Amino acid sequence: MSFTIVEQAPARLNRSEQAVPGSNTRFLEKAAAGNADVVFLDLEDAVAPSEKEQARKNIIQALHDLDWSGKTVSIRINGLDTHYMYRDVVDILEACVDKVDLIMIPKAGTASDIYALDMLVTQIEQAKGWTKRVGFEMIIETALGMQNVHEIAAASKRNESLHFGVADYAASTKARTVNIGGPNPNYGVLTDTLETGNRDFHWGDMWHYAIARMVVAARANGLRPIDGPFGDFSDAEGYKAQARRAAILGCEGKWAIHPSQVDLANDLFSPSEKDVAQAQAILDAMEEAQRSGKGAVTLNGKLIDIASIKQAEVMVKTAEQIKA
Ligand code: GLV
Ligand code: MG
């Protein structure tokens, strides 16, 4: 291990992160009664400029009147380049800080963005004498944010998670697509004819680099990496495929931009009974190995060693967190 110990953000279930526009009171009510691990009440891109103020009021009302217990509540504020942002933070925190767990910072571009917001939130907390510390989740969704993702991840003790905002990221990098996430038929390779005599077209995952890079920045700073939206909410199989590949790369959850995606995410980001049983078998076998002074053994025809213990512990710990 390095002499540098990575401090972990407070543990929270973050399998599903549901987006709920603050401008729609019916959606707010439904989300409070739903199954999402985290809900983010949106003041940014799902809310038209003419509705921003009313959306803020709706959110304050909903935080006071509805029962959000069992959920983590986040507020997606407007970007730091807009004049809406400071009122989003001041009005909502002053009215109901005890109901807000996280602030979601969209289009995080530099570590200074996080620093500035940390200062504002710290001042509000101090002025009010609050001891509860609101956490931050940052959306990495611009070329600038991706360039500075490591510094952003390390910018504040409030930081808890990084999110891949695929739609804005595509716009910012000028990717040739108008979809919100998902594969693209033009991103692939044509195989050569050497082995089979045929040429096949293999689709690739055009978001692989961005997600993998975000995962590294998040994990190196003790944060949760979360995959962002999948716009085609009528395509459950497509959503599941995207969520699965994000989980395999290390993400802990995925956004749900439609209520139908919440259960899909909760299910996909929960390790299966089979996975947990296999992880437990590894832990048992390694305990036995260590008792007899061995660092590596064979389990079901495969080598396992001390690194396997760490992998298995992640799986077992996640399962315990879900059960709790
Ligand atoms: C999310 O905000 C995105 O732009 O995908
Ligand atoms: Mg966005």
Image: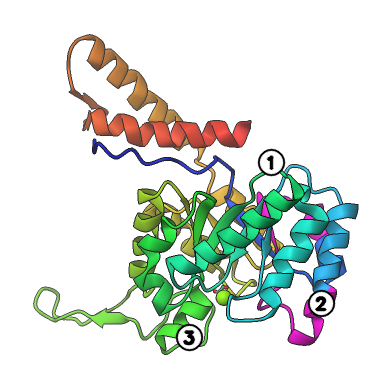
- The total number of labels drawn is 3
Q: Which of marks 2 and 1 is nearer the N terminus?
A: 2
Name which quarter of the figure residue 111 lies in.
bottom left
Q: Is residue 137 left or right of residue 262?
A: left
Q: What stretch is highlighted in magenta?
A: 29-54
User: In the rendered image of this protein, does residue 248 appear above or below residue 279?
Assistant: below
Picture residue at 59% right of the left edge, 37% below the top: 322
User: In the rendered image of this protein, does residue 265 appear above or below residue 167?
Assistant: above
| SS type, badge 2 | helix
| SS type, badge 1 | loop
- Farthest right residue in view: 65
Query: What's the distance in space between the residues labelled 3 and 1, CA to CA?
Result: 39 Å
The residue indicated by pointer 3 is 171
The residue indicated by pointer 1 is 131
Label pair 2/1, CB-CB below 8 angstroms: no
Q: Observer-nearest residue: 297 or 88?
A: 88
Residue 123 magenta-highlighted: no
Picture residue at 63% right of the left edge, 31% below the top: 324
Q: Where does ligand 2 appear, by image quarter?
A: bottom right
Q: Ligand 1 closer than 8 Å to the CB at disc 3?
A: yes
Name which quarter of the figure residue 187 lies in.
bottom left
Amino acid, disc 1: Thr
Query: Dot 3 surroundings within 10 Å: few (below 14), some, or many (20 or more)?
Result: some
Query: What's the distance in space between the residues labelled 2 and 1, CA to CA?
Result: 28 Å
Q: Is residue 107 left or right of residue 5?
A: right
Q: Observer-nearest residue: 75 or 319?
A: 75
Number of the label disc, if any, that sits on residue 53: 2
Query: What percent of the width, then of the height, locates residue 292?
Result: 20, 9
Q: Is residue 149 left or right of residue 157?
A: left
- Farthest front residue in view: 127
Q: Which of marks 2 and 3 is nearer the N terminus?
A: 2
